[in-house]
Image: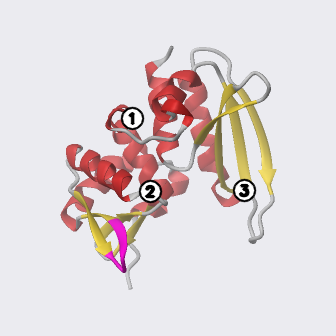
Amino acid sequence: MSTQFVARVLSYSIGKGKIALKGSRKRPWLELKRPETERAYLGSQVYQLRKLHPGELEIFWDRVPTEGFYDLDRARIQSDELWRAYELLYPRDKFTLSPTVLELAGLQGACALWLDHGSWYGRAGEIAGGYSPHEKKLIGEWLTSLGFEAANKRVDSRCRLYISPDSMRKFIPAIRPLVHASMRSKLQRKRT
């Protein structure tokens, strides 16, 4: 088992990646979907997984139609090495974000989380993504342990996870080397 491969799978699964047991043999599959405008980044994710995998990876590419202007490009990846990531993310076959998963994902996971669910909120950062308040609390504690102060705040009766402006000034330079060139625009704050 490749620990680096599992850590990278976990980092992608914190964001938009999904692991599920599929087929009659219930084998683990990792599914990565991105808008077709982000195909270069999706290709980079697959390349990184292929590079870290100890053997051959089964990869199936296709395009998923959407109601919007752009379709989704999808990469479905199968490997027995995915079992360890599945066991960590889906104890009792239910997605469960845990401190162990976040710790294993490390800074690479924080980078993937920002690219998938992060946005600027003035000078602060915000992590969206449909996480429960408990999961946002765990993510906030994890980001704080990495040196980037993050906290939950109630806004409009919803729980939001914010990264402070001071922390964003440290966070962006820390993840910049990990960000694919096609996704660099996510690092820049939109000025109004």
- Kindly report the distance in space between the C-alpha atoms of the residues bearing marks 2 and 1: 15 Å
User: Mark 3 falls on what kind of element?
Assistant: strand
| Residue 87 horizontal/vertical position (percent) | 50, 26
- Please name the residue shown 23% across and 65% down the image: 164
Residues under numbered marks 3 and 2 in contact, where contact means CB atoms less than 8 Å apart = no
Q: Position of residue 75 (x, y in %)?
A: 70, 41
Residue found farthest to the bottom? 192
Whichever of labels 3 and 1 marks the residue nearer the N terminus, that label is 3
The quadrant the C terminus occupies is bottom left
Does 74 appear in magenta? no
The mark that comes first in sequence, 3 or 2, is 3
Mark closest to the chain's N terminus, 2 or 1: 1
Instruction: Assess disc 2: are there few (<14), some (14-19) or many (≥20) residues with their C-alpha within 10 Å of its C-alpha.
Output: some
| Front-most of residues 64 and 98 | 98
The numbered dot on residue 175 is none
Q: Which residues are magenta?
A: 155-160
Q: In the figure, residue 160 lies in which quadrant?
A: bottom left
Q: Are marks 3 and 1 in contact (CB under 8 Å)?
A: no
**Left or right: 164 as drawn, with respect to 74:** left
Q: Is residue 129 left or right of residue 146?
A: right
Q: Residues within 10 Å of mark 3 (few under 14, many from 20)?
A: some
Q: Please, what is the three-letter code of the amino acid marked with disc 3?
A: Leu
3 or 1: mark nearer the eye: 1
Looking at numbered disc 2 in the image, what kind of residue is underneath it?
Tyr
Q: Is residue 87 above or below residue 153?
A: above
Instruction: Return the mark for residue 101.
Output: 1
Instruction: Please name the residue that numbered disc 2 is placed on.
Output: 131
Crowd band around label 1 with a 10 angstrom C-alpha radius: few (<14), some (14–19), many (20+) = some
**Rendering coords of residue 171 (x, y %):** 28, 54
Q: CA distance from mark 3 to mark 1?
A: 27 Å
Q: Which residue is mark 3?
A: 72
